[in-house]
Amino acid sequence: MGRKIVWQVFLLVAVLAALYGQQEIFAQEDAQAICEEEEKEPEEGEEQGEEQEKEPPLPYEVSYEEADGEEKYYTVKPQVTISHPGETGETVYTVENEAGTVLEGRISQPGGQAVIGQETFAEGENRLRIWIEYTPSGQEKELQIFYEKELLFKVDTAPPALDMWVDGGNIWHQYQAGLVYQASENTEGSGIKYIVCYVNGKEQERSEKEKGSFVIRQTSKGGQGIPVAAAAFDRAGNRTVWEGEVYVDASPPSVQISGAKDYLITSKDIHALCAVSDDNMLDFCGVQTIWTSPEGEETVLDGGEWSGEGGSRQAEQIFQNDGIYRIHVRAADAAGFHAETKVQVIVDKNNPVITYVDELDGTWLKEFCWNRPVSELITDFTSYTYRLTLDGVPYLPGQTIRKEGRHLLEAEAVDAAGNRSRAAAEFAIDRTPPQILFEDVENGRAYEERRTCTVRLGNSGDWIREIRVNGKKIELDPDTDVYTCTFDEYRVYKMEVAAADKAGNKAERSVLFEIVAKESLADKLLSPVRQSLGLEEEQFKREKETEEKESAQDSWDETALPAVVAAGLLLLPGLVCFRRIVKKKRV
């Protein structure tokens, strides 16, 4: 029973498998039939739109060098390679510039290439246009454009033109030289960007103008030219360089005469050395000396020979004879600068001489008045002019000046040959008498025991002429302005002092004082009583030695007055008798 069931199941599976296989065979045959139908060529009259569409074309490939100049310019013409990698479509290209279309080409072969050489590109802008033309299958399909592109190639391989020259020519110039330039580009060029000027290898200035000039202010040394250069740059980076030299001199020659000071008057031989020098090149140097004898005769002396070379020359002259020598040295350099110097010297003892002025120098006067004739003031073997000034103001002889203070008198003389003499004297006018000061003593005072007195003058330039004490002359050192002495005898002293200053002003002053014995206490107590009774003569005021004595006297109590009066009445007879004795002695 079981085996029968298994067998029936197996038979059912086999039948189903056979049915499935037959169905797959029918499907394959139907598919093959459909394919054969599609591969059959269409009959006339059937539409081509039923055909299969072609694949679109692949993009072309372009390779070229990057621009080597500035602002994306090519200073070396480029080379461009175009590749057509696809099997469909056609790569088309054209090259255009200002002359129009100069090149056209097509690449239809799969993997084909086209090379556009350097000779195709012209100066200026070149435009390369590339695109792919493609026509789909079917007669009614329109031409299609793919991957259209335009490339710009700016080409400038020619450097700019640069003309340079030195304004005025390649000669020596004063202070500065102008370097004139003119730069230009052809019409297809990129244009002038700027022009640079170099001096001694360093950039000095740049300009964007195509025409102009540069100013060279550096100076030459040792006759050597100044290296200059200029470079013109276009916008593509091309440049043109010019090099040269300019000659600039900013200072005239130096002309000196040593050994002969202008207006020198001497009786000795004069060795005059004429020296001429220049930073660069001397063109001329010469010396002319005119000698005028004391008699007025003029002679042109030989200038002597110049030694040295290059920018330094020297010539020496010796003057031995009396007379006036006028030396004139001239020089010129290659740049046209001129220099000259003149010196006048005199070898003659009888040249203008100014007298008496030096005698006034350093003196002190009460007033000033020049009353000497001019003929005594100035002497010379030729005619002359003169000028007197006092404190810088013209002074006429005979004027009296009394203004106190220091003054400067100047006298200047010029003879007919141009020789000058000058003399000056500084003096002082003083009209103020000396000031006499007594120190430590006062007029009308009495001093106890002893006193030291000092006599001093207010100006240390003054001096004490005489000192007398009670009529007796005191011996003094010359030019003494301070004197000190001590008085210790009990008596009245009269001290008389006379002083003088450098201008002759004089002054006198005296002082009267007394040296007395020191008072006892009884004298101090009875002095007011004696004075009140008229028993005491008028005497010098005693000096109050200390403030303590003053305070002690002021502190007396009024209650002591009766006692003092009583004591005075008791002593009155004795005082009267004493007064008579004193009067007899004085008589």
Image (spheres, helix red, strand yellow):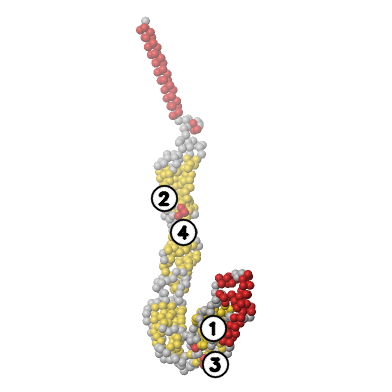
Query: Which residue type does callout 3 highlight?
Result: Pro
Q: Residue at x 52, y 91 (%)?
A: 377
The picture places residue 528, in percent across and down from the top left corner, at 61, 76
Q: Residue at x 40, y 90 (%)?
A: 320
| Distance in Å between CA atoms under marks 4 and 2 | 21 Å
Query: Which residue type does callout 1 highlight?
Result: Arg
First along the sequence among labels 4 and 2: 2
The picture places residue 123, in percent across and down from the top left corner, at 46, 56
> Secondary structure beneath disc 4?
strand
Crowd around label 3: few <14 · some 14–19 · many ≥20 (10 Å): few
Q: Quick check: 239 above or below 109? A: below
First along the sequence among labels 1 and 4: 4
First along the sequence among labels 3 and 2: 2
First along the sequence among labels 1 and 2: 2
Q: Quick check: 561 above or below 70? A: below
First along the sequence among labels 3 and 1: 3
Q: Return the residue nearer the eye: 477 or 323.
A: 477
Q: Is residue 424 visible?
A: no
Residue denoted by label 2: 65
Q: Is residue 474 visible?
A: yes
| Distance in Å between CA atoms under marks 1 and 4 | 120 Å
Query: Which residue type does callout 4 highlight?
Result: Asp
Residue 516: image quadrant is bottom right
Residue denoted by label 3: 373
Residue denoted by label 1: 491
Query: Which residue type does callout 2 highlight?
Result: Glu
Q: Return the residue nearer the eye: 370 or 472.
A: 472
